[in-house]
Image (cartoon, helix red, strand yellow):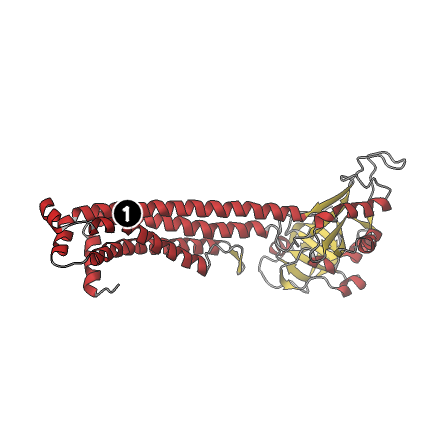
């Protein structure tokens, strides 16, 4: 199909002959494309924001902690308080070989950290370097704990995002500086920006001060007690299938009923990720359903208006047929008008939606770190353009067929 400049001028003249009608018709397509792109980009951003609550957590993670027994067992009454110990880590490593990482965690009851005249409320956690394989830190400054920190009981710490903001509002690198916690000074070796709020243990995320576990055992006189044990399964291992064996291993060592799920709690994060995936599959389906439905409604509007336009131009089309215009020329003329109207409105919808999504993305950027990407990828944009083109052709088919069926004699009679 070949067009020259006169053809484009004729199409432009036809579309601008009734500006209000063309604008309102195009607005239906504009709104449909805008809704589709905005919903896809917004849905992607919302998914990233929700995923950030689980950011860094391995999908096959289990968290184990002790609570009061709810069942009597081997002469012990229910309601007995007991604690896990460091030897449980070795028991799990040897008796459940499917586990990849087994690492203990200690928690404090909270406290206050001081730096100069600044202070902030904190939660102190004691961990091992292996814990970063369970919940990966997002190190903004410095580093995480290493094996030498554990072996030498170094008085070092990794502070959370909120602690850093409160104690160092000027935003400088705090590594090497010392903060005071309960009359003890600790040297900062890193700043962790990971804030996985939906999976938070031992206090509000961002308020944590992480110490080497061996140091915390001494500083807080915790002995061999362990508050929690974090585990991950080896590749291909489903954590839900190991939960009962993990519970039995720990329960047998402490004379706890192996069926007492409250006494030995095994929190499986696999379930959370499954729920999250199912939720967003439904959201994505709804986004495409609403977006394509709105776009289809706009295309139907274009088709209806083009039908009205063809009816108004009956005499013009009849004269063109009388002087030699073929049905193919008439067909291409009407479809081209429909495609151009749809394309201009659709591309405008894409540009406006992308602009708004860009502003949302900038609003979710802090310290140069993008919290969520409210944008559509390249292939989604290509798909949107393809949908616009198809809608333009479909919207023009019925009016074009109506125009092709007009006979010169009937056109003159209509005049």
The 10 Å Cα crowd at callout 1, few under 14, some 14 to 19, many 20 or more, is many
Which residue is depicted at the point 54% across and 47% down? 280
Q: From the image, which quarter does the N terminus lie in?
A: bottom left
Task: Write down the quadrant of residue 219 in the picture.
Answer: bottom right
Give the farthest residue toward the right: 75
Q: Secondary structure at mark 1?
A: helix
Task: Write down the quadrant of residue 138 in the picture.
Answer: bottom right
Q: Nearer the viewer, residue 112 or 102?
A: 102
Does residue 32 appear to the left or right of 335 in the view shown?
right
In the rendering, at what x and y percent does residue 270 appear?
66, 49
Task: Write down the quadrant of residue 94 in the picture.
Answer: bottom right
Q: Is residue 265 visible?
A: yes
Which residue is depicted at the point 53% across and 47% down? 281
Q: Height in image: 127 above or below 3?
A: above
In the rendering, at what x and y percent does residue 220 appear?
80, 51
The residue where tag 1 is placed is 303
Does residue 10 appear to the left or right of 393 in the view shown?
left
Does residue 47 appear to the left or right of 324 in the view shown?
right
């Amino acid at each position: 199909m070949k067009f020259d400049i006169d053809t484009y001028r004729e199409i432009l003249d036809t579309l601008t002959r009734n500006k209000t009608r063309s604008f309102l018709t195009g607005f239906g397509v504009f709104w449909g494309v805008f809704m589709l792109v905005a919903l896809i980009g917004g849905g992607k951003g919302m998914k990233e924001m929700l995923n950030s609550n689980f950011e860094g957590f391995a999908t096959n993670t289990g968290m184990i902690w002790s609570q009061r027994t709810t069942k009597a067992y081997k002469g012990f009454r229910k309601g007995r308080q007991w604690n896990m110990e460091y030897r449980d880590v070795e028991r799990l490593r040897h008796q459940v070989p499917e586990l990849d990482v087994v690492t203990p965690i200690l928690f404090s009851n909270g406290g206050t950290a001081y730096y100069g005249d600044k202070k902030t409320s904190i939660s102190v956690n004691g961990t091992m370097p292996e814990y970063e394989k369970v919940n990966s830190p997002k190190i903004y400054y410095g580093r995480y704990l290493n094996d030498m920190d554990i072996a030498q009981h170094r008085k070092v710490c990794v502070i959370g995002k909120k602690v850093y903001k409160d104690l160092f509002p000027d935003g400088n690198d705090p590594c090497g500086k010392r903060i005071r916690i309960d009359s003890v000074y600790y040297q900062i070796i890193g700043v962790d920006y990971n804030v996985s709020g939906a999976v938070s243990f031992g206090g509000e995320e961002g308020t944590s001060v992480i110490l080497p576990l061996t140091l915390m055992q001494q500083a807080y006189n915790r002995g061999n007690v362990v508050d929690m044990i974090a585990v991950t399964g080896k590749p291909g291992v489903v954590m839900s299938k190991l939960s009962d064996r993990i519970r039995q291993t720990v329960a047998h060592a402490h004379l706890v009923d192996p069926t007492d799920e409250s006494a030995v709690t095994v929190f499986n994060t696999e379930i959370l990720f499954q729920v999250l995936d199912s939720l967003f599959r439904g959201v994505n389906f709804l986004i495409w359903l609403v977006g394509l439905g709105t776009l289809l409604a706009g295309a139907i509007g274009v088709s209806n208006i083009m039908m009205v336009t063809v009816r108004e131009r009956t005499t013009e089309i009849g004269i063109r047929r009388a002087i030699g215009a073929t049905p193919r020329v008439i067909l291409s003329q009407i479809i081209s008008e429909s495609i151009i109207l749809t394309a201009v409105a659709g591309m405008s919808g894409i540009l406006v939606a992308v602009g708004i999504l860009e502003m949302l993305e900038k609003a979710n950027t802090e310290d140069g770190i993008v919290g969520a990407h409210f944008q559509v990828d390249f292939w989604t944009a290509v798909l949107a353009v393809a949908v616009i083109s198809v809608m333009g052709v479909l919207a023009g088919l019925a009016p074009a067929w109506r125009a092709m069926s007009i006979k010169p004699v009937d056109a003159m009679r209509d005049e």
